[in-house]
Amino acid sequence: MNKLALLFALIFSSITHAWTIDGVGDFKFEQASDRVYVMHGPIASPNEQNYGFMNNPIFIEGDNGLIVIDPGSSKFVGDNILKEVKKISSKPVVAVINTHVHGDHWLANHAIKDKYPDAKFYAHMNMIREAEYGEAQRWIKTYSDITDKAKGTIAVIPTYSIGHKDTLTIEGQKFIIHSPLPSSHSSSDIMIEHVNSKTLFTGDNAFTDRMGRFDGQSNMLDNIKILDYAKNLTIDTYVPGHGYSGAVTQAIDPYLNYLKIIEQESRKGYEEDLADYEIKPFADKHLAEYRDWSGYDEQLGKHINKMLLEIEALDL
């Protein structure tokens, strides 16, 4: 093939094998490990321009069907994810696993249910309960307010409950569920180990290149314990909920080290009776490598405040 033909082939391939979001980027599935494909979504917070799409959808190719993890934030996003899946495999989706209740990860279940009505949907019992008791509609409203593309999305809540150390064997692929603590990023988190490829899908227990949020049901100290737990598993590839995948040094250590610095500086501040805003500049001095992470300026003070409250609660 001559150079011109090769260039044309590469350009054509990039166009046909990517979902192009104007002004945001091209998004396609990349092979992360054997039979495992990841689409690394936008790093920015959900907005009108990115259609509310921000997570890392995943699919695993089984013998006669596909297993999808966290397909995205709306039916519109899910429809586009499925178009990209089809460019790699024509097998049907037979199962969907959701890592936690936050809508950016699972509202696209609607698209899969529409196309593959016999697919089974799995999640932690707490996610199922929280979604049924109002979280589903809250998240639908959140994304519908962000972008018209999310309007019309229906909550397809998982019906199969899974928890710590449960195993699933689907189309020749074995999965182990890890959820050793009651809360970390949320109160409904699971991490999913794909035994065949030694890959761990962490959900939002891990991030790269962007900061996580911690709401009232989260626990930052336990998030640290969860990531230390994840490091002790026999894993080759880690896939975070947001940001790029890789070995433990690429996909786990950066966020874990960030959280440990926040804990260390918050403990020092607590002992010296400092307020969160007084601790912030001391923490910032140790976090130079994180300042370009999406959400750093917005979240740093909130993270210190949250950590300080958790440390204080341990003393009560």
Image (tube, grey):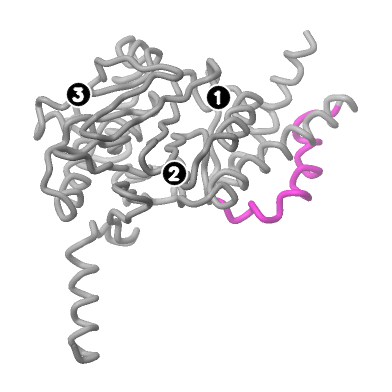
Local SS, label 1: loop
| Up-down relation of residue 32 to residue 154 (above or below) | below
Q: Nearer the viewer, mark 1 or mark 3?
A: 3
Q: Quadrant of residue 64?
A: top left
Local SS, label 2: strand
User: Label 1: which residue?
Assistant: 184
User: Label 2: which residue?
Assistant: 239
Q: Quadrant of residue 74?
A: top left
What span is colored magenta in the figure? 274-293
Q: Residues within 10 Å of mark 3 (few under 14, many from 20)?
A: some
**Upstream in the sequence, badge 3 or badge 2?**
3
Q: Quadrant of residue 276?
A: top right
**In terms of depth relative to the viewer, which is nearer, 184 or 175?**
175
Give how far across and how far down residue 139 sits, in percent.
33, 26
**In terms of depth relative to the viewer, which is nearer, 151 or 282?**
282
User: Label 3: which residue?
Assistant: 120
